[in-house]
């Protein structure tokens, strides 16, 4: 199917999907009823309003689909497949179980595969397991072990950081470990927040709408009004009660917020997730790659007496550790520990390396032989304390490890001029003098500590999820700003508990260590089951399911896996994670703005219905026709409410609940609107003039009363003021223009009539300034 045709089909599908709304049946019923009672023009106008809403909403949904497609561009991966002793570069999507792969440094593993042969192979599995350090692989099988301990397998999406290997593909695509994580991520959580609340409001309004229409029809019939005209009055009430702009206003508000955030490096893939940011009370963070840089740094150094000293580039133990890093053929060291040590040490022109033995997991150390500028020969060794030190790890090493650091012991001895030690022989460790310890830690992401502090100030709890050891995780959490007594639990603690039990365990927990991908999902689901509005921030395949399940899924897109990007509602396009605070502020502003817009839409329409029922009771027929009510909603609902929704309020201390507060605001606005319209209508009835003149005064009083209330709430916003002024001017043009005025059932007004309209607006404004009515 050609791209234009495919796009047209998708657009049509999205437009139809937008019609799946509780408002649609009411509008459709109004259109049909208008046609039945002999008002085909009114029916066409109602249908046009319904179609406009669906088209605009569907267009925005379609644009989101195209944006997602662009995210996937350029993500095709290639693999080296061995066939008949030749190595071919193929599309990874063509791999099948049984194919043999060649893996080299820098390769991203294209499928889950069992190792056939290897040389010093180490794999970065942080995107899958959350472990920050490379994993040494082996050929011995480890059946039944979790992915983090399956050392004879390599997994799709992980990266070769050292060595090389041949491996046979065992699973591809959705059957891989990362593929299953993406499958979990496909589980879409139920909708909540503004959209769900708006649907609830409209469902509750439906019986009231039908009841109001039936009541007006009955009152008109009792007063002797012909049945066709009485039914037309009931249809008018049904149309008046439907806030046609409600779905559109919410959509436009979300898109406006998304555009503002895009300028700050935040890509909003699901605009409807923004409102959840305004209600957020818990944020779960993946550690590696999200709060940390997935890179090691020198965090501590000791001297030969195991006393900690300042971490400086020329610290003796650090200089010796750098000299113990074997030279490579290029500038990039394959081992993360060597890179961190060399980055932390000063450049060393006084050392000439003559031989080197790189680190291997089976050996536990690396060693070099070199000459200083004074001609002295040295053997230098660095590695695990229990390997390098004959008497085991010293207390200082345990102290460093207790701080969550990876501890490297450094030792050495001076060589005779003709001595040539065998670096691959364990005897090389004999006779060494201890030179000190180097402690390595993960590098916190710039701004991560500020982000945690900012969320705390905003009243939002934070939790860190990681596959690290609890002690290491707790130490990193302290570095990032969590308190020293932050509670720590592990994935093992979650096993065997139901959602309620997990929620109780997670209450107040700041660090969750040793968690598997499915347990991250369980954490998020348990928090949501406990009515916590939860965000999940991550970048790896192991985060994808939890990202999808959260109220707001956030992918750190600068380093995110394809699975995390696919699952995320919001993606950070650069490394500055503090922009999340702006996203939260924008979400709160969105919630407040949409709440105000809903008050305008629903409260104004409630006033219209109340005024119509009162007018039918007094005059025997509704004061306004279906066509006039559509004009009212156009002038007062759609454009002014949209302007309010897309404008950030000046003060947003927190999200406004769409609950009792909204109900009260709707009721108070409805009362003030009804007072203004009734005053203008009664003034028209009590002064000389036609029934059409009275109806026109009621129309202008109704529109004016609502615009005045809208301005009172947002008079500082140029957009809202301009929209309200434009609506008022448009109404005056419609009323005062012959022909156009008659089309809407109006007549041009004179000074006395406009004075009556002004009186109605003033009365409404005074009523809106009175203390709000509250439930008793």
Image: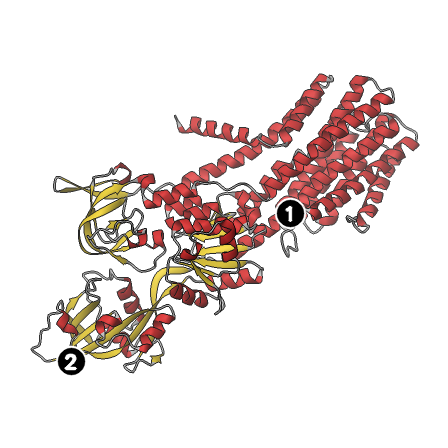
Residue 631 placement: quadrant: top right
Query: Relative to 268, does residue 677 appear above or below in the rendering?
Result: above
How far apart are the two marked residues, 2 and 1, measured between alpha carbons? 73 Å
**Quick one: 572 or 396, which is closer to the camera?**
396
Picture coordinates of residue 353 (x, y %)? 16, 71
**SS of the residue at dot 2?**
strand
Image side of residue 621 versus residue 43, left or right: right
**Quick one: 453 or 648, which is closer to the camera?**
453
Residue drawn where x is 39% and y is 43% of the image: 182
Residue drawn where x is 62% and y is 45% of the image: 646
Q: Residues within 10 Å of mark 1 (few under 14, many from 20)?
A: many
Residue 244 visible in the displayed image:
yes
Q: Looking at this rendering, what residue extends furthest in the front direction?
A: 496
Picture coordinates of residue 171 (x, y %)? 28, 41
For disc 2, the marked residue is 414
Image side of residue 574 versus residue 708, left or right: left
Residue drawn where x is 29% and y is 40% of the image: 172
Residue 759 placement: quadrant: top right
Residue 347 visible in the displayed image:
no
Residue drawn where x is 67% and y is 28% of the image: 26
Picture coordinates of residue 540 (x, y %)? 38, 51
Residue 404 placement: quadrant: bottom left
For disc 1, the marked residue is 593
Image side of residue 682 versus residue 567, left or right: right
Image side of residue 660 versus residue 260, left or right: right
């Amino acid at each position: 199917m050609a791209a234009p045709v495919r796009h047209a089909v998708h657009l049509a599908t999205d437009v139809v999907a937008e019609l799946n709304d509780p408002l649609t049946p009411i509008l459709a019923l109004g259109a049909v009823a208008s046609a039945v009672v002999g008002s085909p023009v009114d029916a066409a106008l109602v249908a046009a309003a319904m179609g406009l809403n669906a088209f605009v909403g569907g267009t925005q949904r379609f644009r989101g689909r195209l944006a997602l497609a662009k995210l996937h561009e350029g993500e095709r991966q290639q693999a080296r497949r061995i066939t008949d002793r030749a190595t071919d570069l193929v599309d990874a999507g063509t791999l099948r179980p049984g194919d043999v792969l060649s893996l080299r440094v820098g390769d991203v593993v294209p499928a889950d595969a069992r190792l056939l042969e290897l040389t010093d192979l180490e794999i970065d599995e942080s995107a899958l397991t959350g472990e920050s350090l490379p994993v040494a692989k082996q050929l011995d099988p480890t059946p039944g072990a979790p992915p983090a301990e399956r050392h004879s397998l390599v997994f799709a999406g992980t990266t070769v950081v050292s060595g090389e290997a041949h491996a046979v593909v065992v699973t591809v695509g959705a059957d891989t470990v990362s593929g299953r994580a993406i499958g979990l991520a496909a589980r879409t959580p139920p909708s909540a927040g503004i959209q769900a609340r708006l649907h609830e409001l409209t469902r509750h309004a439906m019986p009231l709408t039908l009841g109001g229409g039936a009541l007006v029809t009955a009152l008109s019939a009792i007063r002797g009004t012909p049945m066709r005209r009485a039914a037309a009055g009931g249809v008018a009430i049904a149309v008046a009660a439907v806030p046609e702009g409600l779905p559109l206003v919410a959509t436009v508000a979300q898109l406006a917020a998304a555009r503002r955030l895009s300028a700050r490096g935040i890509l909003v893939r699901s605009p409807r997730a923004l409102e959840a940011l305004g209600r957020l009370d818990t944020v779960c963070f993946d550690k590696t790659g999200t709060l940390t840089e997935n890179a090691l740094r020198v965090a501590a150094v000791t001297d030969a007496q195991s006393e900690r000293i300042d971490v400086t580039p020329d610290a003796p133990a650090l200089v010796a550790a750098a000299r113990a890093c074997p030279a490579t053929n290029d500038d990039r060291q394959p081992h993360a520990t060597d890179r961190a040590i060399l980055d932390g040490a000063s450049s060393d022109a006084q050392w000439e390396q003559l031989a080197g033995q790189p680190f291997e997991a089976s050996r536990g150390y690396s060693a070099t032989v070199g000459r200083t500028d004074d001609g002295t020969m040295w053997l230098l060794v660095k590695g695990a304390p229990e390997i390098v030190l004959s008497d085991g790890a010293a207390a200082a090493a345990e102290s460093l490890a207790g701080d969550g650091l990876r501890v490297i012991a450094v030792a050495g001895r001076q060589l005779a001029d003709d001595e040539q030690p065998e670096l691959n022989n364990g005897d090389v460790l004999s006779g060494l003098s201890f030179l000190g310890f180097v402690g390595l830690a993960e590098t916190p992401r710039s701004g991560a500590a500020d982000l945690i502090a900012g969320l705390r100030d905003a009243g939002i709890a934070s939790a860190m999820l990681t596959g690290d050891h609890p002690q290491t995780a707790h130490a990193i959490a302290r570095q990032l700003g969590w308190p020293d007594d932050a509670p720590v639990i592990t994935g093992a603690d979650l096993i065997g508990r139901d959602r309620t039990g997990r929620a109780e365990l997670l209450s107040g927990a700041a660090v969750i260590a040793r968690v598997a991908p499915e347990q991250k999902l369980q954490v998020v689901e348990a928090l949501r089951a406990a009515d916590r509005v939860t965000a999940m921030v991550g970048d790896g395949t192991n985060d994808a399911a939890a990202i999808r399940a959260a109220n707001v899924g956030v992918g750190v897109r600068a380093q995110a896996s394809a699975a995390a990007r696919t699952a995320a509602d919001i993606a950070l396009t650069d490394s500055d994670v503090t922009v999340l605070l702006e996203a939260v502020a924008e979400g709160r502003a969105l919630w407040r703005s949409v709440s105000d817009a809903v008050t305008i839409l629903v409260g104004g329409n409630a006033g219209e219905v109340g005024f119509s029922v009162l007018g039918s009771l007094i005059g025997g027929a509704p004061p306004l026709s279906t066509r006039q009510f559509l004009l009212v909603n156009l002038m007062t609902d759609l454009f002014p409410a949209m302007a309010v929704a897309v404008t950030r309020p000046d003060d947003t201390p927190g999200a406004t609940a769409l609950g009792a507060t909204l109900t009260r605001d709707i009721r108070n606005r409805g009362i003030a609107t009804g007072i203004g319209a009734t005053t203008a209508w009664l003034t028209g009835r009590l002064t000389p003039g036609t029934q059409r003149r009275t109806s026109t005064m009621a129309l202008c009083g109704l529109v004016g009363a609502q615009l005045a209330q809208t301005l009172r709430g947002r008079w500082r916003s140029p957009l809202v003021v301009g929209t309200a002024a434009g609506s008022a001017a448009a109404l005056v043009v419609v009323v005062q223009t012959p022909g156009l005025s008659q089309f809407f059932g109006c007549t041009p007004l004179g000074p006395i009539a406009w004075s009556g309209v002004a009186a109605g607006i003033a009365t409404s404004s005074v009523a809106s300034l009175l203390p709000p009515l509250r439930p008793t």
